[in-house]
């Protein structure tokens, strides 16, 4: 196993969502020599959607489908079953340098305004008894359609809906504690990089 020396990417917008996935479904995407971390027939999978405004491969969008968690004593690591990017350079970099199963895809984004209802101070209780009042505001909903492109053929992979009403930071208001996480992951064992690599995705947010 090789330790990847340092693949640094700076993300502008990212969404990390985890799901319980049936272990019997995941095993087809995990190397046989790696043991799947599971309980009651399920493991932890999910997806990672990001837009990078600065990276070794330039500006690009990325969707990583996490098959599940595999055991690597003394800890566990995520295993990516699919990686879709909208840049040939990012695809090549992911395959050769990071050992990811990267494929080129098209990310179509559409933003539409949707109404939002903001409850007043006592709105929760008043709405329960049918006399509540609400104030309508607007926010945006972003539809992200991801379509894999292989030569002249293309196939729709998924559609993700995101709310884009991120509040503007106020420097005189506490934004919550700073959280830094390191998510260890395995990659490699592909036709482009046969070695088994280990790296960490470091996230910093509030």
Image: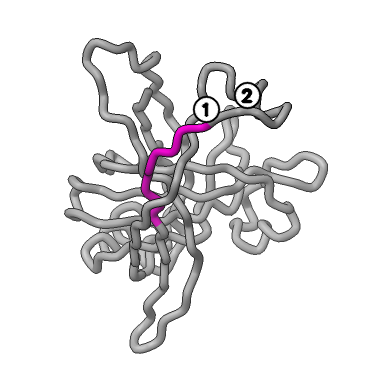
In this view, the residue in front, 146 or 132, is 132
- The majority secondary structure of the magenta stretch comes to strand
In this view, the residue in front, 116 or 35, is 116
In this view, the residue in front, 200 or 175, is 175
Q: What stretch is highlighted in magenta?
A: 134-142
In this view, the residue in front, 63 or 27, is 63
Q: Position of residue 63 (x, y in %)?
A: 41, 56
Instruction: Identify which residue is drawn at 38% across, 68% down.
Output: 103
Q: Can residue 65 be seen in this view?
A: yes
Q: How far apart are marks 2 and 1 (CA)?
A: 7 Å
Instruction: Identify which residue is drawn at 50% across, 50% down.
Output: 47
Q: How many marks?
A: 2
Residue at the extreme right of the image, as rendered: 40
Q: Position of residue 183 (x, y in %)?
A: 46, 34
**Residue 124: numbered disc:** 2
Is the residue marked by circle 1 packed among few (<14), some (14-19), or many (20+) residues within 10 Å? some
Instruction: Give the answer, above or below, for where 84 lies relative to 149.
Output: above
* Residue 139 falls within the magenta-colored stretch: yes
| Marks 2 and 1 close (CB-CB < 8 Å) | yes
Of mark 2 and mark 1, the one earlier in the sequence is 1
Residue with the mark numbered 1: 119
Q: Position of residue 150 (x, y in %)?
A: 38, 81
Q: In this view, does 186 lie to the left or right of 203?
A: right
Instruction: Give the answer, above or below, for where 140 lies relative to 112.
Output: above
Question: Residue 8 sits in which quadrant?
Answer: top left
Q: Is residue 8 visible?
A: no
Element under disc 1: strand
Q: Position of residue 199 (x, y in %)?
A: 40, 40
Quarter of the figure with the C terminus:
top left
* Residue 143 falls within the magenta-colored stretch: no
Q: Is residue 111 left or right of residue 115?
A: left
Instruction: Identify which residue is drawn at 42% across, 29% down.
Output: 182
């Amino acid at each position: 196993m090789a330790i990847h020396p340092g693949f640094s990417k700076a993300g502008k917008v990212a969404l990390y969502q985890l799901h319980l996935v049936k272990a019997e479904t995941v095993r087809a995407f995990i190397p046989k020599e790696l043991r799947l971390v599971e309980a009651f027939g399920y493991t932890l999978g999910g997806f990672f959607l990001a837009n990078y405004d600065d990276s070794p491969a330039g500006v690009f969008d990325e969707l990583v489908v996490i098959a599940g968690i595999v055991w690597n004593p003394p800890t566990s690591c995520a295993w990516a079953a699919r990686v879709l990017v909208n840049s040939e350079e990012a695809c090549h970099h992911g395959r050769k340098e990071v050992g990811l199963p990267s494929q080129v895809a098209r990310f179509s984004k559409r933003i539409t305004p949707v109404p939002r209802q903001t409850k007043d101070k006592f709105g929760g209780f008043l709405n329960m008894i049918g006399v509540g009042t609400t104030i309508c505001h607007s926010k945006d909903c972003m539809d992200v359609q991801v379509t894999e492109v292989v030569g002249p053929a293309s196939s729709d992979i998924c559609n993700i809906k995101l709310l884009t009403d991120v509040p503007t930071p106020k420097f005189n208001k506490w934004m919550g504690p700073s959280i830094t996480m390191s998510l260890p992951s395995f990659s490699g064992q592909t036709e482009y990089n046969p070695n088994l690599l280990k790296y960490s995705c470091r996230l910093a947010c509030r």
